[in-house]
Amino acid sequence: MLIIFDLDDTLIDTSGCVTPFKMKECVKALTHMGVQLPSVAYEELMQLNAGSSKSKDALSSFARSYGATHDQIDRVLDLLTSSLPDDFIVQMTPKAKEILEFYRSSHHLALVTGGHPPFQREKLKKAGVDSSIFSMISIPEDSVKKPSYEMLQEKFSLPPSEIWVCGDRIEMDLKPGFELGFNTIHMRWGRGASMPSQPWIKHSVSCLPELKEIIR
């Protein structure tokens, strides 16, 4: 069998660890650029981010609402995927590392995560995950995952019934897998926690140890 994991808010707690740090840095940067922000700017930005599908969309909208120029917005957006401090520790979701170890000897494991490849790999490293645990790592910058899923199915020559995909975002992570006939597992974490389920989603978990009752 093959289990395909997402990274952000599936294996690592991006919404609770990385995003708050990055948003604080962006608020500081906008202030240094001369953009006049209220004292509650960080709280406002985080609230806006909670209702957005992407952090970049929330940050761009927030900066624009306070009169930031296109150049200032571009500069602050770059901060979202800039390197983290050397001593920054990326927290994993509960028992995620143990689950990877549990399945590594009995299943093929793959990581398919959208975003800026160097930053995604940095987060994985700072979370203390040995990347060799994955038979394949794919990081499409456009976050379109279906081609990566198709490539994995071809690589392992497995029928769809023997492939599982686990992620927090329904449209981005799970729908492409469903369209290919894969088993889908919705990780209710981060933005995924508030997303309404879909009738075609076979399983839903709030922490990865629950996979032991699903993937046997």
Image (cartoon, helix red, strand yellow):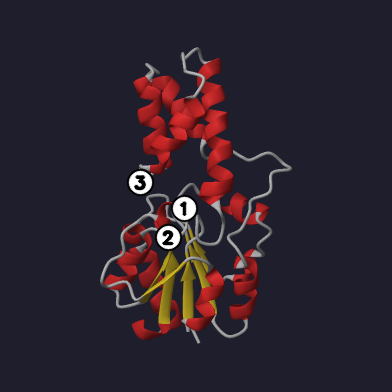
Classify residue 195 as left or right of residue 5.
Answer: left
**Going 46% across and 49% down the picture, which residue do you hit?**
115
Residue 41 position in % (x across, y down): 48, 25
Q: Is residue 121 visible?
A: yes
Left or right, 159 with respect to 187, comes to: left
Contact, CB < 8 Å: mark 1 with mark 2? yes
Q: What amino acid is found at the position of numbered circle 1 in the picture?
A: Gly
Report which residue position mark 1 lands on. Answer: 190
Say what secondary structure mark 3 lies in: loop
Outermost residue on the right side: it is 87
Q: Residues within 10 Å of mark 3 (few under 14, many from 20)?
A: few
Residue that numbered label 2 is attached to: 168
From mark 1 to mark 2, how far is it between C-alphas?
A: 7 Å
Q: Hey, what amino acid is under mark 2?
A: Asp
Secondary structure at numbered mark 1? helix
Of callouts 1 and 2, which one flags the residue occurring earlier in the amino acid sequence?
Answer: 2
> What SS does tag 2 mark?
loop
Can see residue 135?
no
Task: Classify residue 99 as left or right of residue 69.
Answer: right
39 vs 44: above or below: above
Which residue type does callout 3 highlight?
A: Ser
Q: Nearer the viewer, residue 40 or 26?
A: 40
Q: CA distance from mark 2 to mark 3?
A: 12 Å
> Is residue 32 shown above or below 128?
above
Q: Residue at x 54, y 23 (%)?
A: 29
Residue that numbered label 3 is attached to: 53
| Residue 144: % across, % down | 35, 57
Q: Residues within 10 Å of mark 1 (few under 14, many from 20)?
A: some
- Residue drawn at (69%, 59%) of the image: 128
Disc 1/disc 3 C-alpha distance (Å): 11 Å
In front of the other: 106 or 52:
52
- Identify the residue shown where x is 57% and y is 30%: 25
